[in-house]
């Protein structure tokens, strides 16, 4: 091969250190995403969104456990959007505590994902492993604060206490605490969301990604 392109620093070092790739043949080009220009409507109920197929390593169990720990008085709804790849949705539904049955929605992924992003107030992703997550980039492009597990490329997208929170994988207690914090505090959500959008514009725009790919293909 003349060149191996990866989309995150974590993958870059894995290719070099674990796969033995020559650093001179390895290059990082981050994923790009379009910036959404929308004005969010004020709502009483805080809407949380997770876009991830129902695959074991996406760790939806952590999400259900965290939401089960939230105080009952909080007003929120959760949309879990994805395809039931590993046939685990029924098992996940069985773990939801009675008080949350009407608050958690399982939605099959479709092409009109933007409507969920437009209505969301918080984006979450609890994977046990990741490259550079397109879901997180989409959350950020819509000006959402993000809570994600501290794995893979997530640490290159989410900066603790700046545009969201990072939590250790399987730490549903900390996830629940961070969720409660954001659900209660609209000003923090807005502040983090503005930073999310700025990070996307500066580092992860579709235009920037295109220019880098175009340059590389032209040179090769």
Image (tube, grey):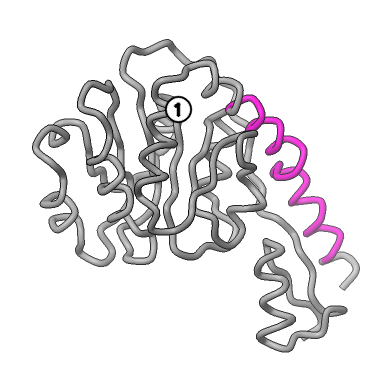
User: Which residue is rendered at x = 58% and y = 53% of the image?
Assistant: 154
Residue 195 falls in image quadrant = top right
* Dominant SS type (magenta): helix
10 sits left or right of 88 in the view: right
- Specify the quadrant that holds the C terminus: bottom right
Q: Is residue 75 magenta?
A: no
207 sits left or right of 102 in the view: right
Question: Magenta residues, as a range?
Answer: 193-216
Q: Position of residue 155 (x, y in %)?
A: 62, 53
Q: Which residue is mark 1?
A: 182
User: Which residue is rendered at x = 73% and y = 89% of the image?
Assistant: 20
Q: Position of residue 127 (x, y in %)?
A: 43, 58
Whether residue 105 is situated above or below residue 37 in the rendered picture: below
Whether residue 169 is situated above or below residue 97 in the rendered picture: below
Q: Secondary structure at mark 1?
A: helix
178 sits left or right of 212 in the view: left
């Amino acid at each position: 091969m003349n060149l191996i392109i990866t989309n995150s620093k974590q993958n870059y070092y894995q290719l070099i250190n674990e796969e033995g790739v020559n650093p001179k043949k390895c290059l990082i080009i981050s994923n790009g995403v379009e910036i959404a220009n929308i004005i969010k409507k004020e709502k009483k109920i805080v809407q949380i969104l997770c876009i991830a197929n129902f695959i074991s390593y996406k760790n939806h169990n952590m999400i259900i456990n965290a939401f089960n720990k939230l105080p009952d008085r909080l007003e929120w709804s959760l949309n879990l959007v994805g395809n039931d790849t590993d046939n685990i949705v029924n098992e996940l539904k069985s773990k939801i505590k009675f008080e949350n049955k009407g608050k958690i929605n399982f939605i099959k992924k479709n092409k009109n994902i933007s409507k969920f992003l437009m209505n969301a107030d918080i984006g979450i992703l609890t994977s046990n492993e990741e490259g550079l997550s397109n879901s997180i980039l989409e959350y950020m492009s819509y000006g959402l604060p993000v809570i994600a597990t501290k794995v893979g490329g997530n640490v290159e997208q989410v900066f603790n206490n700046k545009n969201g929170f990072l939590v250790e994988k399987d730490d549903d207690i900390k996830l629940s605490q961070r969720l409660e914090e954001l659900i209660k505090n609209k000003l923090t959500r807005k502040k983090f969301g503005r930073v999310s959008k700025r990070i996307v514009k500066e580092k992860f725009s579709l235009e920037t990604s295109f220019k880098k790919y175009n340059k590389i293909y032209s040179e090769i």
